[in-house]
Amino acid sequence: MDFVSVNKMLEKSFKENWERPALSNYKGVTLCYKDVAKRIKHLHICFEKCGLQKGDKVAICSRNQANWGVCFLASLTYGAVPVPILHEFKPGNIHYLVNHSEAKVLFVDDVLWENLSESEMPELYVIVQMNTLKYLYSRDTDLKLVRDNLPDTFASEFPGGFTPNDVNYYEDKPDDLALINYTSGTSGFSKGVMLSYLALYTNLYFAREYAEPQMTCESEVVSILPTAHMYGMMFEFLFEMTIGAHVHFLTRVPSPKVILAAFAEVRPDVIISVPLIIEKVYKTQIKPLIDRSSMFIYIPVLNQFILKKFRNGLIDAFGGRFEEVILGGAAFNPEVEKFLRKIHFPFTVGYGMTECAPLVTYAKWYKNKPGSCGQVIAGCSLRIDSPDPRKIPGEIQIKGGNVFSGYYKNKEATSQAFTEDGWFKTGDMGIIDSDGFLYLRGRLKCMILGPSGQNIYPEEIEAVLNNLNYVVDSLVIEDNGGLTALIYPDYHQGELDGMDREKFLNRIEGYLPEVNKELPNYAQIRKMEFLPEDFERTPKRSIKRYLYQRN
């Protein structure tokens, strides 16, 4: 794998796809590659005028939208270091991350700006409203003149109009710092993951090798994950920009209803998602049909007909044109996975993390094994810290071009993240089979030690609980030497089914003996507790476990 400049890949793509659509706001504006290139050049002129140097940090904090892509690409192709910040973060955290990253420029959503203050971010040169690209604040009054005179400056620099020949982007090197991505994670402290251009290229290279021939400059993609998160950024945006594809940003809360409507209209060529989305579709739209058809499933002819109908219906619901659905970011419910395999639905599960930019393992849907998240990608090596990696779970450790350079301004955390011989310690547990397929067994820090020293992986118990009727999600915690299941129930469905609150909760509690029959003696659930509202979650919809621990 010979390194190619990421920015030069983008430059080539822009020139070759000048008239093609690049970025769209769903139900809103569409920018062609030439429009994005022109906006990038406008921002490059502004960067130069305000004294932004190569390597300076540019913070970007907004919901998904076309101008998010413009601002990110403008920063990257200028040679600055974009710092995507999740817009779900609290104002105080956003202030902290802007300051910690030493950002000189902040692009911010107009809604978020209402709760922020320039006085809390004193090192910023300028703050720009993401939606309009207009200045909200500039430390130097002369910078306002840059904005006001920009049309004249642009016209004088390009008297014959801005053409593909005028696109010329910063040529990056493998070890150059490409971006800083702050982890959302399940712990309370955000760390700035420093990713090199080599880390980005390793992922882009693999995506190009995997995607060909089905993804081309004519491909359509719906971006439903936060672009400030590496999974969404890399595979719903950046990769697409390097091949000339068309990205549709939802620009709104990605509920299943909104997502399925966008899929039906856009008909994407590939779907990138977290398991929770497809699990919700299964639970709300497919499982009720399965329950109603259960009496016919044991009749072979009808069984095949019904399963084919389920498959076709689910494929149509996701747009009908995609080659596969790629899931990652969290554990996948075993019942849902088993059903999807039974109907031969084209899905696969990958594994990655921010520190690996993000991909570690993947296999095409027709090659992947049940329960596995694929094989290690090109340019990356994987090992399991276990005396018997095929049978005994151990920590997954990674080495390769995709691995991050360290945590920004945090030498202690960086040192703790690597072994003495230079392997990145993921904190995830797993086993690997003789064919190199990885099987996750939960987070190392989530593992609970049983009464006789057994390893209990709460995610496996939660998968059983989440299959119960009326259970939206669950979390298993250690509580005074036993296990307690925290449950967020579907209160609305209980009301629709005519149950008052007490009867409804008793119904769910009555499932406990059946659940424990499926669990080993050392992993029995002692009691259930019910939450009045949903768990607090990270942007990739993982539960913030640290908020609910008791021991």
Image (tube, helix red, strand yellow):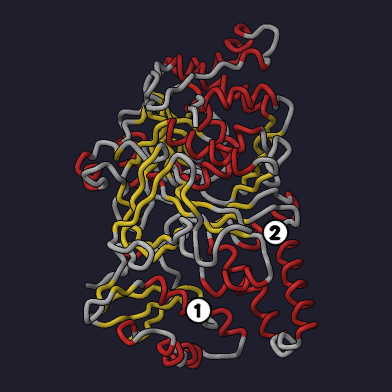
x then y, percent, for residue 456: 32, 74
Q: Quadrant of the C terminus?
A: bottom left
Of badges 1 and 2, the one in the foreground is: 2
**Camera-side residue: 264 or 157?**
264
Q: CA distance from mark 1 to mark 2?
A: 24 Å
Q: Which residue appears at 70% of the width and 27% of the height?
A: 17
Q: Is residue 508 left or right of residue 549?
A: right
Q: Does residue 67 sit above or below 366 in this rendering?
A: above
Q: Amino acid at mark 1?
A: Val
Q: Residues within 10 Å of mark 1 (few under 14, many from 20)?
A: some
Q: Which residue appears at 46% of the width and 19% of the height?
A: 47
x then y, percent, for residue 339: 62, 73
Q: Is residue 136 left or right of residue 155?
A: left
Q: Secondary structure at mark 1?
A: strand
* Mark before the other along the chain sequence, 1 or 2: 2
Q: Does residue 520 sit above or below 67 in this rendering?
A: below
Q: Amino acid at mark 2?
A: Phe
x then y, percent, for residue 391: 36, 68
Q: Secondary structure at mark 2?
A: loop
Q: Is residue 130 left or right of residue 345?
A: left
Query: Would you identify the image quadrant in which residue 289 lies?
Result: bottom right
**Camera-side residue: 87 or 528?**
528
Instruction: Tell me the number on the disc at residue 532.
Output: none
Q: In this orientation, does residue 440 appear?
A: yes
Query: Would you identify the image quadrant in which residue 304 lies?
Result: bottom right
Residue identified by numbered label 1: 471
**Camera-side residue: 120 or 177?**
177
Q: Does residue 154 sit above or below 199 in this rendering?
A: above
Residue identified by numbered label 2: 318
Q: Residues within 10 Å of mark 2 (few under 14, many from 20)?
A: many
**Camera-side residue: 306 or 117?**
306
Q: In this orientation, does residue 229 appear?
A: no
